[in-house]
Image: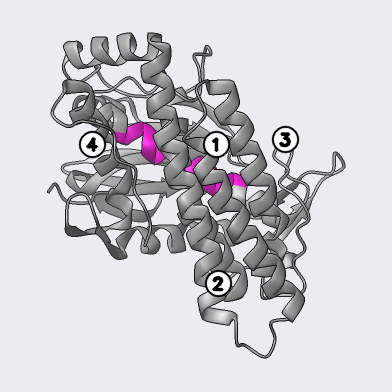
Amino acid sequence: MRPLRNVIYIQTQNAWVHKDNENLVLKVGDETKARVPIHKLQGLVCFGQVSVSPYLMAHCAENGITITYLNIFGKFLARVEGPVSGNVLLRRTQHLTGADRDKSVAIARTLLTGKLYNQRSVLKRYLRDYRDHEATSPAAIADLSTAEKRLSRCLEQLQDCQAIDTLMGREGEAAQVYFGVFQHLLRQSDFQFDARRRRPPTDPVNALLSFCYTLLTHDCRSALETTGLDPASGFLHQLRSGRPSLALDLAEELRPIVDRFVLSLINKRQLLPKDFEYWPNDSVTLKEEPRRTLLAAWQDRKQDTLMHPWFEETVPVGMLPWLQAQILARFLRGDCDSYVPFLWK
């Protein structure tokens, strides 16, 4: 098992990042703010006005360290990476599999099975932890129990779907059920959520979900490239210019883990309503300093461990995208009978 390497998030505006021997150094003006060993890095994510020296950029490209540029609000702008890695035959097999309707449907069905199973696990965990809590209303328990049963029914119906459009319809139905009771999972009354809204997110909870899904997709894309797969050629998300379709596929089954992370930030009051900025177009974004709090908590969460049932090992949460990419690659090579999603117990 390979070691978990870190992703560095830089959001200090007008920062200058360069290489000094085997260290990454961040400077603002003439003052050195941080110094990190480069060999421990998996990626570099720059928010807004952050400059990277050509020498550091070349080193990152040569050593598989991806540099991603986002705007100040976390929207993707560009990505710098080195030569494409991996076996060209693996990518060819991936592309041929994606062109086969039946095989694509089979993989997409498995991905969504993992997603719905893990969404149901989020509800089960809440019912287990708070069913008898005095602050939990009987109505909330009834709604969550009903939603759990409906997700179980959606899981069963997935097995009969024989087309991508049908699968997406079932996934949409499950998402409506899941996010329809998401408000009950929030233990802080000053956060409100009534529906999932993405473009743009119109409340703090949606803003957190969108931002953290972006972080997850970044990790999934890096995992696929490290494994030698093409992140742009998906099975559930079909081909579209400029879209990392396979990274979005891989992220689907791991989104409920991100949901739990967002709930934890809110319920433990690590973030408050005052930490968000409200814009004239009704969009909501996280302010700069609270974003540091979130990114630090995200890195801590990735260090937590859990049992991976397929590998039968205790692994860091941050390794899940890479491990699932490995399983997908093994399946495409013919080393195992099917892709096996991560099922959160």
* Percent x, y of residue 210: 61, 45
Q: Which mark is residue 327?
A: 4
Label 4, secondary structure: give it.
helix
Residue named by callout 1: 49
Front residue (pair 203, 140) = 140
Give the residue displayed 51% in from the left and 47% down from the top. 116
How far apart marks 2 and 4 lie (CA) works out to 30 Å
Say what amino acid the circle numbered 2 marks. Tyr
* Badge nearest the viewer, 4 or 3: 4
Numbered marks: total: 4
**x and y, in percent, of residue 148 in the image:** 59, 60
Amino acid tagged 4: Ile
Residue 199 is tagged as 3
* Of callouts 1 and 2, the N-terminal one: 1
| Residue pictured at 22% horizontal, 44% vertical | 38
User: Crowding near pointer 1: few (<14 within 10 Å), some, many (20+)?
Assistant: some
Query: How many residues crowd mark 3 within 10 Å: few (<14), some (14–19), many (20+)?
Result: few
- Residue under pointer 2: 126
Which label lies toward us, 2 or 3? 2
